[in-house]
Structure formats: C-alpha cells, structure tokens
Image (cartoon, grey):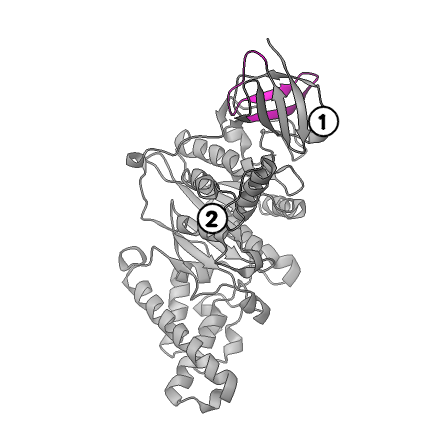
Amino acid sequence: MELGYIFSIHGEVVEVVFYENHPFIGEILVLEENPQALLEVNRILTKDTFVCLSLTEPEKLFRGALVKRSGKRLEVPVGEELLGRVVNIFGESRDGLPALRTKEKRLIYRLPPPYREILPRKELIETGIKVIDFFTPLRKGEELGLFGGAGVGKTVLLSELMHNIAFFKKGLSVFAGLGERIREGHELYEMLKKTNVLPWVSLIFGQMNEPATVRFKVGFVAATIAEYFRDTLEKDVLFFIDNVYRFLQAGNELSTLLSVIPSEDGYQPTLLSEIGELEGRLVSTKSGSITSIQAIYVPADDITDSGVQAVLPYFNSVVILSREIYQEGRYPAVDILASSSSVISPEILGQEHYEILLEAKKILERHKELQQIVSIVGETELSVENRIIYRRARKLLNFMSQNLFMVTEQTGQPGQYVKREESVKGVKAILEGELDQVPEEAFLFRGGLGDLKS
C-alpha cells in the first residue's frame, strides 16, 4: 500500500502528502508506527497535499512520520453493550471496566430520516419537575432546551431530568458530555450508579481538556448510538447533551485552526449547517422516538448571542434560567415568562391545565408590572385587588421552587417528584384563593397541594 508522510504540523491541523493512492475527504489515516494516532482528512490543499485534523494528541505526531490509509470513515460501536458504560468517541472504555465487545459499528455522520418517515408523537413526558411540567411541558419525540449563563443550574436541572425520567420511567437514555468539566461527568456517573439508573444509560464524553476535533464529534457519536436504539431496537430514547454551546465553540476553534474567515459576529460561517446537521437527526420515526433535552450555555447572559440564536429554533420547549431568580434563592431558577413551549394547547394538555396555565401567566405578567410600583412605593400603596393579585403571584412563584434529587447531599433535603396533576391542582388552588391565608414563605420548596395543606 502506498504510504504518505506528515509534511507539517500546526497544532491539531496536519498537512499530509500522498503522491499516489490519494485519500478521500473524511477518511481516517493511521500513523504507521503508532496505530493509536489517528488523522481525519478535512480538505484537499494541492494535488498531493491534504489537510487533516488530529483525532489524538498532536504530541504523538512528528514531521516525516509515515501514515497509511484505512479506507474508512470514523465509525463507532453500537449495541445494547453500551448501556451502563462510559466511552469516548472511538467507543473505547473510559469507566475502568473491560473493553467493549459489540457486533456492529456505524458511521458517525449520517443523513436524517426522510421527511415521510418522521412521525410526531402526542404523548406528554412527565418530568416530575413542577415548573417544567406545568409551564413548558415536553412531548415525546421533541426537544427541550435549557438556556442559561454560567452557574445558574443548567447541569443540575439536566441531570435531574435525566434521573427522574430514567429512574421513574426506566427508559433508555444516551448522554453526550460535550466539552464540560471531567468532575461534572464523574459526579453524574456516580449519581446514576447510586440510584441504579446506570444500566439504562449510555454515556459518551469528550471533555474540555480534549482536542476541538474530538469535542466536535461527541454529539454525532451520541446521535449515532441513539439512532441505533431507535431504529434497530425500536425503542423510545432519551437524548441528553451538556453542553450544546461547547459544540458550537469546538466548531469555531476548528474553523480558526483551518484559517477560515469568520462571519461578522466571530462565529464560523458554517455555524447554521453544523447545528442543523446534528439537531436534524434527533427525530421520531415509525420505529421509535428520540426525545432530546439539551443544556445551552448563554455567554455573558446574552440570549441574543448569534450562537444561542442559531440553536433556539430547533427546540419545541425552551426553559430560560435566570441569574436574578437564582440569587433570590428559588430553584430551579426558571424565568417562567421568558420560557415557552409549542405544546401548549387544550388538545395536548387538557382543557383544565390549559386554562389554568393561561390564567397563571396572566397573573405573573401583572405581577411583573406591579413589582416596579412596589419597589418604589411599597405594597401598601396597591389597591386591594392588585394586592391580592401580587400576593397570589408571589405564592405561585414560590410554589414553583422544588427540592431536587441531584442536590440532596448539598441541601440535606430529600428530592421531590411531583406529578403533573398535582402541580395543576396546586396552581389552581392558589389562583382561586383557597390558600390566601397561607404565608408565601410556606410555599417554598414544597411538593404538591397535600404538602401545602399539611
């Protein structure tokens, strides 16, 4: 077989020369003397020179090193053997357990199913988290986005959703740890193990200390594994990503390394196509469904950031986490009025939930207006009617706080799983004045209506 050689190395970008038997774009090249060192052909520079991206640490490479073609694109092992395991983008074990033995591999870059095969579902997924089930419900086979700046609880809320749905529903889950801290990945693994959820979850990690090439591919690898569960095993799959912004960031780093001229706002010109390539695969078919829950970091708390705006249209339910609410001590720190869901209709939610939700939002809108008056002249200056609305809205906001299973060790409070019907009953009782005599502090971190009356 005709060998090539490394002509130059610029960090993760490697130029390789092949005089004969030219490789194709996307092909994996292997260092002859170290089969663990892999390169992926990115583009053709000249007739015999090819620009590659290193899939391993560039320290393993040197000028003049011989490389050989594999004739293959990047593949990942798929199968039930991945459940309960932690792997990297190559399907290699990262949990200290024996190497995986699977019967099948699949290419990580695949086209989404044809439009005619996509089959929307009508069934709601109960998460056990009041503020999500009541204000931004999630339908099976759709996408929920958790948007927020640094340190407002995105990872905790994502992990709580993963715990609640996997633990109480026992569904298959795929988790993509994309560019986040190793510590957070380890904590998640230990939590899943402790709560006996791990056997239903497959975890794929590409942490922030790894090359941008690796981080960029984590989402595609995880999507490939989820598609196998959906199409071959015909299962309903839960797909989690933490954090989508790191995917965009990795793409931006690669774009810079490859000297691609950025767009006006500094992001790579391929931003929209990259996010579409990933999100477009997370759909439901006749075989099964992929329900996606993703955390998205909002840089400098600026929701208008171009990267954030590129991701936003793909979500059916959007949960915005607020630093102001977080600082007030209400968790999860969800900005209810900024959050939204496309499934808010009487046909899906039922007439009662739909009407109560509209009334609750109306009261919260009014509370937002009254809050400005109260901050200047005080609550006593409000009319009797406005004072009632203001106090009920305060109770409603406090009622949406909740103790989470994920932080039990930090807070000392047991986690709460609240059914959607209980959330609806509780909000209804607040809006109808049944709990007007209960002080608003009593609504903090309670479960359903029964906890309020006890």
> Can residue 198 be seen?
no
Q: Residue at x 64, y 33 (%)?
A: 12
Q: Is residue 115 left or right of residue 164?
A: left
* Residue 36, quarter of the rendered image: top right
Q: Residue under circle 2?
A: 293
Q: Position of residue 340 (x, y in %)?
A: 40, 59
Which mark is on residue 410?
none
> Can residue 9 be seen?
yes
Q: Residue under circle 1?
A: 60
* Residue 152, quarter of the rendered image: bottom right
**Secondary structure found at label 2:** strand
Q: Residues within 10 Å of mark 2 (few under 14, many from 20)?
A: many
Q: Which residues are magenta?
A: 19-41
Q: How many numbered marks does the figure carry?
A: 2
Decide which of tag 1 and tag 2 comes sooner along the chain: 1
For the residues carrying marks 1 and 2, which lies nearer the camera in this image?
1
Instruction: Locate the N terminus by quadrant.
Output: top right
Compared with 360, 83 (above or below) is above
What amino acid is at disc 1?
A: Lys
Q: Residue at x 54, y 12 (%)?
A: 21
Q: Position of residue 248 (x, y in %)?
A: 53, 44
**Secondary structure found at label 1:** helix
Compared with 241, 398 (above or below) is below
Residue found farthest to the top: 1
Q: CA distance from mark 1 to mark 2?
A: 36 Å
Q: Residue at x 60, y 57 (%)?
A: 150
Between residue 211 and residue 15, name the one nearer to us: 15
